[in-house]
Amino acid sequence: MGDPKLIVVSGQPRSGTSLMMRMLDVSGVSTLADEPRSYEMEKLNNLAEDNQWLLDLQGAVKILFPLVMHIPVDLDCRVIWMTRAPRQQAASQALMAGRFHSPAFIKEVNYKIPRVFKVMGKKVLTVSFNSLLDNPPKQAKRVSRFVGRPIDSDPVVRRDPRPGFFKFGELESR
C-alpha cells in the first residue's frame, strides 16, 4: 500500500482530531494548516462554496464535521474518522466551547458518517480517542497500516502521573 495523496482527519469537535494530526505531524506526514500546531485552515470555512482546491493538496488536513461533508466526491484521499465516548465528548465541547451536541447526536453521527464516506468510495479508518489513550502503540499501528507509512504515538501520547490526565506532546488534557 502506497502513501495516499491526501489524508483527511475528521470527526466532530473535541473527538481527538488535533491529537491525530499531531501524531501524523511528528511522524513526518506533511500537515496542512494556516499556523503550525493549530491544524486549522481558514479556507475550509468556505468549503461548501469552493472545494476544488482540495484536489491539489498533499499531506494531511483536518476537516471537522459538518464541513467534511463538502469534500469533492472525486477527491483521492483516505479518511481517518475520530470518535470519542459521547458523554465525554459532549462534556469536553461544553467545557471548551460553552455549547455541545447531545451524546445521542454524537453517537448517531459517529455511526452514519463513516458509512457515507464509504458510499463516496473513500477508504475510512475509525479511531477512538479513548482507545488511542488506552493503547497508543496499537492504534498507531492501525493508522500506520492505513496510511502506508510508520506512525509513532510515543512522542505524542504519554500518561501523566495524575489520574485521568494525559499529555499530548506539550498539550495537556483531561
Image: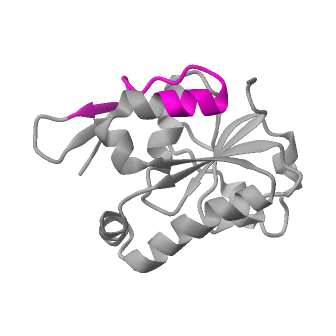
In reply to whether residue 161 is colored magenta, the answer given is no
- Residue furthest to the left: 162
Q: Residue at x 62, y 27 (%)?
A: 29
Q: Quadrant of residue 91?
A: bottom left
Q: Which residues are magenta?
A: 141-159
**Relative side of 116 to 170, left or right:** right
- Residue closer to the observer: 145 or 96: 145
- Up/down of 156 relative to 47, above or below: above
Residue 116 in view, yes or no: yes
Q: Residue at x 11, y 45 (%)?
A: 163
Whether residue 45 appears in this view of the structure is no
Q: Nearer the viewer, residue 93 or 123?
A: 123
**In the figure, is residue 18 to the left or right of 9?**
left
> Residue visible at 59% across and 53% down?
10
| 148 is within the stretch colored magenta | yes
In this rendering, would 146 be left or right of 93?
right
Q: Is residue 56 above or below residue 118?
A: above
Foreground residue among 132 and 17 = 132
